Image: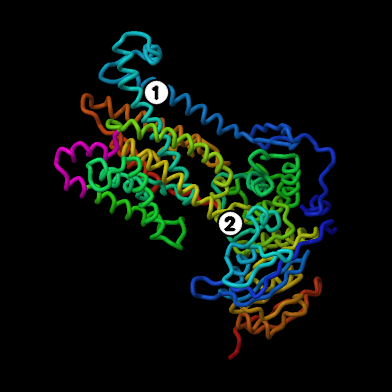
């Protein structure tokens, strides 16, 4: 250590005139070019991340084909693709294009949005349990949206109401732990409490309206892709597109926010501002997804968990979480549609059946210590 | 070896830091000598860690200011500050599975951007930081697999890669055994030899005497002594700080003060 290190200048070092070739760090590809203004630009692409995302992408495409072919009228997977483009029998074209495709799109979008919101919130709180579903944001969005669906209170559209509800729940949770920070169990417990209150509000609203109205709203309160409002899906598609771009812009500070605040701050991250941006993004994504499918918050826990088990620890697995979430949602809804056909199990119940044991496993699993 | 550019100065001006209603540091004015190792010592709860977080802008002053080259650090953008001042918090924690070189590369963050993710400069500085901390052979090991001293050296290497003239360390040796403590202190001395200004909070007065050029002794948020250890450490100071009596000797090899026969102060 000493002999080799002592002749290396530490802060007084002069950049070399002719730079040696740059090697990408292990596990990365490096793309370098000169910008038009002559600046040296470089990008690092993490190899494992690309491989994981490609793998998940392929799995998602397979799941989508399966989704489009299975159901009360089964189609051969080979007939799905032509039907998708309007070729083949009229009935298959109708089944694929009109019945299954819109629902599949909604499944992919909501799954992706829930999981992206989940991984953002987990990173923010540095806690794998801190997903919007667990800290009550889903329930807040649901309570407000149900109020709008059953025609109580303000006559805003469900997406706007869901957004208001999600923001209210987030503000309450963060307000309750004011000063305590977003780390640790206090935050989670406060969130669970807020979620329980909003869950009760939803039940109260349903109890007070006519039985038929309540019946109509019920599948939606447990999370279902059956009654998806078209405008909400469009809004979610736009929101998710913007959200993905925003998440990419935030990717570098996000990978530093996994450290202690002091470390991230010391490395030049404006922790407070970034945390607020990440929180807002997570809340908006959750609200838009709830407005389409109701509270399927478990996807926000399962998606990032799958992504994290596949990806490396070099960065926050944003794309992999998004794809895993979409995959879980598509498979869960496929199972819900087909397992007990003709009875349909709402997707929220399927994910809860998978997600409950998953949550227990996370809680019981011995934590690996790291310092 | 001296730096070509003038070394930056860090000082406070009637600085007051509070936790809620409790004032921890009150109207404190201190100037940290450039290119030297300064140790902040004092009893538990005297405000030494709070002062360090104030110096790093983690703690917003209630009044007064921290001045970097004469400018209030509150007005500096986070990234600019991060190119001037590196901070190693107490018991730093890294995401699971991160390797030594991955950790050190995070130190380049303030110098990088969206379209400047890995330059020749970054590569050279990271290799240099690995060498300075003597971690070349461990570069691709996960942090969990290192000993306490190696891990702490990896964290310091991250701050070396940040290439800041100022380095603040909060109890860098608190959880380490003697051998690992020496590893870390020797690295700190090495950095100071190469022109860095190092400020560290230490709870162990003996190590502070041995490895610091300048000592700041805090008691209840006030400076009770500051200067070279050999000049300011006296049995009276030790008694004021820690309520213990001791016999003071001079280390025959290094000339730094040694505490012997430390015992509870007689009333």
Disc 1 on helix, strand or loop? helix
Snapshot quadrant of residue B42? bottom right
* Nearer the observer, B101 or A141: A141
* Nearer the observer, A282 or A367: A282
The residue indicated by pointer 2 is B92
First to last magenta residue range: A204-224
Residue at the outermost bottom position: B267
Chain designation of label 2: B
**Residue at image location 66% in from the left, 55% down from the top:** B82
Image coordinates of residue A8 in percent, x first then y, are 81, 51
Snapshot quadrant of residue B27? bottom right
Mark nearer the viewer, 2 or 1: 1
Disc 2 on helix, strand or loop? loop
The residue indicated by pointer 1 is A64
**Labels 2 and 1 positioned on one and the same chain:** no
**Residue at image location 39% in from the left, 48% down from the top:** A363
């Amino acid at each position: 250590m000493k002999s080799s290190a002592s002749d290396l200048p530490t802060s007084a070092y002069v950049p070399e005139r002719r730079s040696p070739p740059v090697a990408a760090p292990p596990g990365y590809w490096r793309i370098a070019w000169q910008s038009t203004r002559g600046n040296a630009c470089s990008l690092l692409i993490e190899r494992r991340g690309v491989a994981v995302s490609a793998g998940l992408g392929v799995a998602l495409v397979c799941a989508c084909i399966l989704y489009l072919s299975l159901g009360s009228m089964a189609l051969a997977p080979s007939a799905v693709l032509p039907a998708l483009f309007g070729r083949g029998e009229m009935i298959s074209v109708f089944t694929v294009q009109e019945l299954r495709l819109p629902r599949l799109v909604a499944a992919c979008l909501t799954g992706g949005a829930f999981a992206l919101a989940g991984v953002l919130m987990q990173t923010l709180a540095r806690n794998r349990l801190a997903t919007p579903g667990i800290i009550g944001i889903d329930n807040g969005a649901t309570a407000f949206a149900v109020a709008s669906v059953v025609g109580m209170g303000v006559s805003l559209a469900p997406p706007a109401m869901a957004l208001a509800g999600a923001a209210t729940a987030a503000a309450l949770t963060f307000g309750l732990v004011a000063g305590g920070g977003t780390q640790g169990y206090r935050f989670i417990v406060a969130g669970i409490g807020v979620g329980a209150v909003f869950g009760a509000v939803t039940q109260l609203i349903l109890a007070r309206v006519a039985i038929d109205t309540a019946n109509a709203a019920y599948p939606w309160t447990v999370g279902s892709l059956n009654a998806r409002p078209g405008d909400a899906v469009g809004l979610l598609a736009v929101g998710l597109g913007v959200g993905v771009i925003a998440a990419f812009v935030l990717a570098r500070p996000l990978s530093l926010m996994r450290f202690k605040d002091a470390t991230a701050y010391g490395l030049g991250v404006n922790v407070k501002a970034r945390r607020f941006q990440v929180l807002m993004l997570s809340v908006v994504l959750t609200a838009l997804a709830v407005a389409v499918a109701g509270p399927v918050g478990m996807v926000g826990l399962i998606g990032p968990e799958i992504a994290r088990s596949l990806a490396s620890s070099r960065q926050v697995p944003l794309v992999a979480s998004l794809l895993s979430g979409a995959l879980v949602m598509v498979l869960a809804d496929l199972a819900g549609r087909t397992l007990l056909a003709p009875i349909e199990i709402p997707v929220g119940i399927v994910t809860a059946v998978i997600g409950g044991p998953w949550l227990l496993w996370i809680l019981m699993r011995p934590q690996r210590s790291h310092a | 070896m001296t730096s070509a550019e003038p070394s930056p100065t860090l000082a406070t001006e009637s600085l007051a830091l509070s936790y809620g209603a409790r004032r921890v540091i009150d109207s404190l004015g201190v100037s940290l000598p450039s290119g030297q190792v300064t140790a902040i010592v004092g009893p538990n709860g005297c405000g030494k860690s709070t002062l360090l977080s104030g110096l790093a802008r983690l703690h917003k002053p209630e009044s007064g200011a921290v001045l970097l080259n004469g400018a209030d650090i509150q007005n500096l953008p986070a990234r600019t500050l991060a190119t001037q001042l590196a901070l190693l918090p107490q018991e730093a924690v890294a995401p699971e599975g991160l390797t030594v070189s991955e950790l050190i590369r995070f130190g380049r963050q303030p110098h990088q951007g969206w379209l400047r993710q890995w330059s020749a400069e970054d590569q050279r500085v990271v290799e240099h930081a690995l060498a300075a901390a003597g971690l070349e052979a461990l570069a691709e090991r996960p942090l969990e697999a290192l000993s306490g001293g190696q891990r702490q050296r990896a964290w310091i290497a991250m701050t070396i890669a940040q290439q800041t003239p100022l380095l603040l360390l909060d109890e860098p040796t608190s959880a380490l055994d003697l051998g690992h403590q020496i590893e870390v202190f020797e690295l700190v001395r090495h950095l100071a030899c190469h022109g860095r200004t190092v400020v560290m909070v230490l709870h162990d007065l003996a190590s502070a005497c041995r490895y610091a050029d300048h000592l700041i002794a805090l008691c209840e948020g006030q400076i009770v002594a500051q200067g070279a250890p050999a000049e300011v450490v006296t049995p009276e100071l030790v008694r004021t700080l820690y309520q213990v009596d001791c016999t003071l000797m001079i280390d025959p090899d290094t000339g730094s003060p040694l505490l012997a026969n430390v015992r509870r102060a007689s009333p």
